[in-house]
Amino acid sequence: MLLGWLMSCAFMNHWIKKSNLLNLFKTLPFILLGLTPLLWFFGKGDVLINGIDTNFPLNPSTWLERRFYVWNNVTNAGVDFSSSVAGLFFHLIQFIPYKLGFSLQFVEIFSLTFWFLLLTFSSYYLAKTIFPKKIVVHFFFVSFYVFNIYLFNTWENVKVANLALMASIPLAIAILVKLQKKSINYGNLTLLAATTGIILTGSGINPAYFLVLILVVGIFYLSLLIAPATNLFINQPYKKCVSTFLKLLFLGLIIICINMFWILPTTHFIFGNIAGDKSIDKIGFTNWIDSLSENTGVLNIMRLQGAWDWYSVDQTTNLPLYIPYALNYFHNIIFVLFSFLIPGIAIVSLLFRGKIWKNNYLSVAFGIMFVLGVFLGAGTHLPTGSAYRWVSERLPFFTLFRSPWYIFTPLTVLGIAGLSGLLFSKVLNGLENGKLAIAKWLTTFFILAVSLGNLVYSYPLVTGKIFRPGRSDGFYINFPAYIFDAGKWLQQGHGRVIGYPDDEIENFHWKYRGIESILQLVSNREVLFSPLNAPDSPQSKLVHEFYTSLKRRELNSMEKIGAKLDISLLFYKADQDSIALKLPEEVKNFSSQSFGKWIFYKMPTQANPQKIYAASDIFLGDFKKGASLIGALDERDILLEENDSEVKKIPRIEENFGNVIIGKNSWADEYYYFANYPSTLSNRLQFRDISKVEFEIDAPKSGKYTPMLETYRLEDFGLDVSKGIEVLIDGKKYLWNKTRMDDSYVYFEPIELIQGLTTVTIPLVESNLVNNGNKTLSNFISNGLGDYKVLGDESEAYLSIINKRAESRDDRDISALFKVEKFDPLSIYLVQFKYKQVYGNNGLAIAGQNIGNTLVKIQQERLPNYPEWNPFSFYYEPVKTESEMKIELVSPFIQDPLGTKILYSDLGIYKVFTNRLILIRQPSVLTTSLPNLSFNQINPTEYEAKIDNAEFPHTIVFSESYSPDWKISVFADGGNPVSIKPLHFSANLYANAWYFDKTPSSYNIKIYYWPQKLFIIGASISIMTIIFSIALFLLGRRKRNEIH
Amino acid sequence: MKYTENYLGEIVERVKEWTRVRQFQITVFNILLMLLILLRSAGYFAPYFPITINSIFLAMLLLSVFILGTRSASVGLVAFFFWTLAAILRILEINVWSERAALYAFEALVVCVLLLVLETIFSKKKL
């Protein structure tokens, strides 16, 4: 029906050209295409499309509000939000129907349909501009531009930047073409530029997309310059050429000025905070360019099949892990053929330029976009990838383009759509006056068939299968009511909320999955979580430390870390699918508030010193090890970096500040190298000394230090601290007597340390955790048919395992299986044994965990071929979940009829002593009186505080992520500015701190994030530009009316 | 049918004429091609600059522009040929060959677009 409709449109065109009815008739297919999002919700019930990167706000008001500030205080102790303010227009579209009282589902449908229609009509507008009077070509162009595989991912995650770019590219090109053709008056052109600018704002979320638009416009303009028909240098006088350029510049300026509200702060952020070289790594973000470029070969890219998630498959079943419909595109012959068809048509377009060179600039422009899009989209995939990498390593800030396929494929899409459209247009033009009417009919039919075929080919986008309905990882979510109640309740309180379980991806029973805290969707309350994107950031390390203390039941330490992070609530998600350890019973005794399956435990009050506070005692330490030290310092004590140049400027630093150091644990150190360096045999073919642990202490200053030893499971190592522990300090024996103890640390009497290195040795008595500590290997479970024998005398007993082909009926490895007793998933384990390979295949040791029949983790260690008794050892770090741990000593299968014979003896499994030894030197002068401080948050970028009783030098801590852009102004009580410029430095690894000396006893401060001023300046420019554009449009219209 | 025969005949004649005029250039082109293949088979310049089939293809494509005066449309035809080949190989699930054919198609496409740009710049045609 649609086909007939479009064909009738195409052929009725010549006899009812000026009819408005026909125009509507012609536009109807495009309206229908634009309403595609309605299909996504058809028959799905009261659901929302949400999850992972989609982030549809469940409270659009708060999300819009956040877009007015360049600092987002909600996420992980605050983060610069300069580029994200670019989402203002996008969220305004959601805010309007929400404020009008429509349901959230309606808001989402409205928002999605708005963008789909925008995409459809902007591409239709361009098609009409470059292929006038060719409705079938318009239909093809729109069909391919709006429905293609690249956009699957864009829509699946509702990527604002991609949508903004894809919607504004056609408009920007149309401006250029219309400017060149002079087919539109200047007022309208200005309004069109302003509209493009507004739509484009969303691309600022990832400024790389904004640069892509500039690239597209640049390519198009250059093509206009060089093409014979439009060549400004050949066909137009110099003055006219300059005039055209100036007009283009003016329109470009309108677009840029409208985007100024995010351009100003983002430019400041990029050039002020990010290094040009290896930018992405230096800001702590994961550089995933190589993994993303794994499947971006030319063959895939030219067919727009470069998304990494298409190629993630289950190793066992070989089925796609994320994209179920990808199989059709890989194996269905019709789909495979179609994937080659449209790029093929684009290539053919370059063969037939036609006799008329009028549109040659279009061939040039689309041709360049096609090849450039493929080249850049391939990223670091070889062979073109070596050139990309070369550029990436040399061009400053280029590493910020860490997702090349996602960023540059709009060029490929436009190139293919444009070239194919040109070919169709040329063919139809050629047949226009020809005698072969049937050829014209057939061509029209072919174009429509390809266009409709493309809709079928893009069926996941048309039908909403991109959102994986019916699957456990689907995006159709029915949000339970209690999360909205929780959201409202959270708005009232202060302090941060940290979630548990601590998985990087939240996966709820009711299907919602997210990489950030779900609380961000429903409220503006500040939250902390394990960030997937920036695992090495200081905040991330502290959050990790908090969780470790919580799991180890070291609540004292947990509360101290919580205080440094301004945590007031522990958010327990009982509806989250997780293998994380259960919440400790002690936490369940905290006062709490429940909403359905969500429980918010209130952190004990004394551990919550507020976001802005005056520091008590100050300690200097090494920030690289700082995450381990924070939990040892009292709530209001703070840690400063000992090598910070600003900190060193503080007078009498040695007297006023203490030191906190951590001993280098020889065993933990050895494990670290084992786990983090390439696997070698040299660090495995040995027995390890388990009788002691050595701590290397590097004291920065001579003096008395209080040793604090982490209490976690000390008894497992034969340490009874109640009687004191015997230690060796640089080889001399001492007895450390306990002074006090809590659930996290045992404190000993202070010891005298001399500046420099000191070694503290603690003897350990470790028990073997397998076979009841018996090394004779008798209590094993045989796994598979074979000859298992314990041989030798009692003192030198060994286990012989013979795996003969005849006995091992199913030709597989056999093993002796040992269960680890008193298994603690929070400890690291050392496995060591002796082996002798008598004949057959190489031996194998397997350490692993399982929950019932479900395998959690497995680590295999292949034993080198060696016919004599040989020691072997390795470490195993368990997955932190309630499970069983087992060790298997394997006799592998071999084709040889003699089989394999391996002897094992002296199997020992021991916990690794990773407990920390921290030493604290108290400041010479202890803080006796602290100033009183009260504060008020004006907005996320501005705080006011009043300080009283400030008699002595003091340090004020502001627990938001450190940035040199946080500024402070000091005012006297009357409101007059005071000329004090306190030193600004980072504290507690992540926060801001200012050191005040010689202040009035009572004063006020204002802490503000100064790039917010750039936002205000930029926003003023944006608003003025919009007003100016509208005024110019109205002026042009009035003039036109006057002329008429 | 007769129309097609005539049309094909005309093409054959034009190809013959084209070949006759460029006999020397075709000889040089073939000699260079053979030389590169011989150098590759003997492993010349490896490991510093291994001559791969890919580099031979790209070099000959570029040399064809200078020696034979190839135009963008002809190179585009090469691109189309390899793209079709890639499609056939992909349908036959010979993915490695298909990937390679697609790479040749892309390389030809790059040269085609470059030539198109140059032809456009140096074209004397005006509206």
Image (tube, coloured by chain):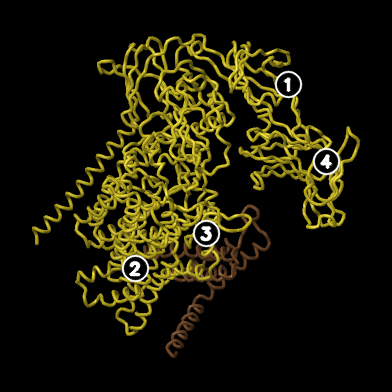
Chain colours: A yellow, B brown
Is residue A282 at all visible to an observer of this figure?
no
Cβ atoms under marks 4 and 3 closer than 8 Å: no
Q: Quadrant of the C terminus of chain A?
A: bottom left
Mark 2 residue type: Phe
Q: Which residue is mark 2?
A: A139
CA separation in Å, label 4 and label 3: 46 Å
- Subunit ID for the residue under disc 2: A
- Subunit ID for the residue under disc 3: A
Is residue A758 at all visible to an observer of this figure?
yes
Looking at the rendered image, the disc whose residue lies closer to the viewer, 1 or 2, is 1
Label for residue A763?
1
Outermost residue toward the right? A793
Task: Give the mark nearest the N terminus, 4 or 1.
Answer: 1
> Is label 2 in a helix, a strand or a loop?
helix
Tags 1 and 2 on a common chain: yes
CA separation in Å, label 4 and label 1: 28 Å
- How far across and down, in percent of the image, does residue A922 sit? 54, 13
Q: Which residue is mark 3?
A: A324
- How far across and down, in percent of the image, does residue A425 sit? 34, 71
Cβ atoms under marks 3 and 1 closer than 8 Å: no
Mark 3 residue type: Pro
Quadrant housing residue A1039: bottom left
- How far across and down, in percent of the image, does residue A557 sit? 54, 24
CA separation in Å, label 3 and label 1: 57 Å
Q: Residue at x 48, y 20 (%)?
A: A635
Label for residue A904?
4
- Seen in the picture, residue A196 relative to B125 is either above or below; the reply is above
